Image (tube, helix red, strand yellow):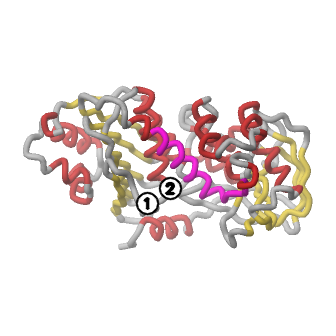
């Protein structure tokens, strides 16, 4: 057995080899807009644009919020991503006056695709898959990079010029204005938010979790003041070789995320999970960024309903699953919560229902859970239990 989700996914992604864009040392195309900030060798990082060898509107290639509602297939998403070529150059995270960084800020604040030209030291090669960030195609050190005219998104522009606005307030303000999460995260990663003297580049992987956590934690403070849900609800959604069951319970806030990987590399059946009680979570989650993406999506829905609830989310990933980044969790959970919920009067009935949909059955999840096990032990299985 592979111990730990990180080790499992590392082995899984190491076996992925798919055809990506093939170009020479020069590229004339369009950025969706898209940028990538690496974390290796921090605080000096590899920063650069991601460009498609296409012209025109390429926004769909880096707008995860539209993929599931538009029913994009896994193959279509991977094709989008592997046709994005990553240019990179070493930059200090505090060097925001760097000409390349200024262009990356232009890209991240743009309200549409940007015509771009790049020259690389060598022909870009390789590809990258991760459960944290969306995949991308070949990469190489960039020698020259130019962009066409850029028009900034007005909401992002306002945040950029407000040099006294804290990053937390900037992220929350943009979220409240329904700016897409991916746009907020990209702008955050290239140092366009926060008090001026504190601004810096933030690696893409870290910026995703930072934005998820910021939004989730602030929504939780709001949700704590609402009345508790008066029934048990189960919301479901399936896409991209995943099944999600979101159970909302009539309790004060508590949260558990459980995910099972079933027969993806062979006959493995692994479950990884993490949880928090009403007091919140200390330290970084053992299951990585998806913990915070799911938490944010659930709290987002509770805030819209002006209700408080406990939440237990069960996910199964099946044969054919490919790690596409934590957007997969955030957007699937968001879409699950948009579906009509099935109501239950007791925990036993809810678990029996979910068990009929889960390939592993509910018992395996209960046995490896913390919150489910505690709730299932309750002698009274009606709502009085809560």
Residue lying at 65% horizontally and 45% vertically, measured from the top left: 166
Along the horizontal axis of the image, is 105 left or right of 186? right
The spot of residue 44 in percent (x, y) is 74, 69
Quadrant location of the N terminus?
A: bottom left
Residue furthest to the front in view is 164
Residue lying at 26% horizontally and 41% vertically, measured from the top left: 354
Label 1's element? loop
The spot of residue 71 in percent (x, y) is 55, 34
Q: How crowded is mark 2: few (under 14 residues within 10 Å), some or many (20 or more)?
A: many
Q: Which mark is residue 361?
A: none
Along the horizontal axis of the image, is 217 left or right of 143? left
* Residue linked to disc 2: 289
Residue nearest the viewer, comparing 290 with 42:
42
- Contact flag, marks 1 and 2 (Cβ < 8 Å): yes
Along the horizontal axis of the image, is 319 left or right of 127? left
What's the magenta bit mostly, secondary-structure-wise?
helix
Residue nearest the viewer, comparing 345 with 61:
345
Residue lying at 25% horizontally and 33% vertically, measured from the top left: 232
- The part of the chain drawn in magenta is 199-219
Residue nearest the viewer, comparing 48 with 156:
156
Residue 206 is covered by the magenta coloring: yes
Q: Residue 285 carries which label?
A: 1
Residue 90 is covered by the magenta coloring: no
Label 2's element? loop
The spot of residue 31 in percent (x, y) is 79, 45
């Amino acid at each position: 057995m592979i111990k730990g989700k990180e080790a499992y996914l590392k082995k899984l992604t190491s076996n992925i080899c798919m055809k990506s864009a093939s170009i020479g040392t020069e590229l004339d195309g369009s950025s969706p807009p898209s940028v990538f900030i690496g974390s290796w060798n921090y605080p000096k990082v590899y920063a650069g644009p991601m460009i498609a060898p296409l012209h025109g509107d390429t926004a769909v290639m880096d707008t995860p919020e539209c993929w599931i509602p538009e029913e994009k297939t896994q193959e279509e998403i991977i094709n989008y991503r592997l046709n994005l070529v990553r240019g990179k150059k070493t930059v200090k995270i505090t060097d925001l006056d760097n000409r390349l960084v200024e262009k990356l800020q232009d890209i991240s604040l743009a309200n549409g695709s940007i015509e771009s030209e790049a020259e690389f030291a060598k022909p870009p090669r390789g590809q990258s898959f991760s459960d944290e960030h969306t995949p991308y195609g070949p990469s190489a050190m960039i020698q020259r990079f130019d962009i066409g005219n850029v028009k900034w998104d007005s909401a992002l522009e306002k945040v950029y010029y407000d040099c006294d606005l804290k990053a937390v307030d900037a992220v929350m303000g943009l979220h409240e204005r329904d700016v897409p999460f991916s746009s907020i995260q990209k702008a955050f990663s290239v140092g366009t938010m926060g008090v001026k003297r504190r601004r810096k580049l933030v690696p893409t992987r870290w910026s995703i979790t930072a934005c998820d956590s910021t939004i989730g934690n602030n929504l939780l403070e709001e949700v704590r003041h609402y009345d508790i849900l008066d029934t048990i609800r189960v919301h479901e959604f399936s896409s991209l070789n995943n099944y999600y069951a979101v159970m909302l319970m009539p309790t004060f806030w508590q949260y558990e995320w459980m995910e099972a990987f079933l027969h993806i590399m062979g006959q493995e059946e692994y479950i990884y999970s993490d949880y928090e009680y009403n007091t919140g979570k200390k330290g970084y989650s053992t299951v990585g960024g998806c913990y915070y993406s799911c938490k944010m999506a659930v709290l987002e829905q509770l805030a819209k309903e002006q209700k408080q609830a406990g939440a237990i989310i069960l996910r199964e990933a099946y044969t054919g699953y490919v790690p596409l980044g934590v957007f997969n969790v955030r957007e699937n959970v968001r879409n699950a919560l948009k579906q009509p919920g099935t109501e239950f009067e007791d925990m036993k009935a809810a678990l029996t229902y979910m068990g009929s949909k889960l390939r592993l059955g509910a018992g395996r999840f209960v046995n490896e859970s913390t919150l489910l096990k505690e709730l299932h032990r309750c002698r009274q299985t009606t709502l009085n239990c809560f």
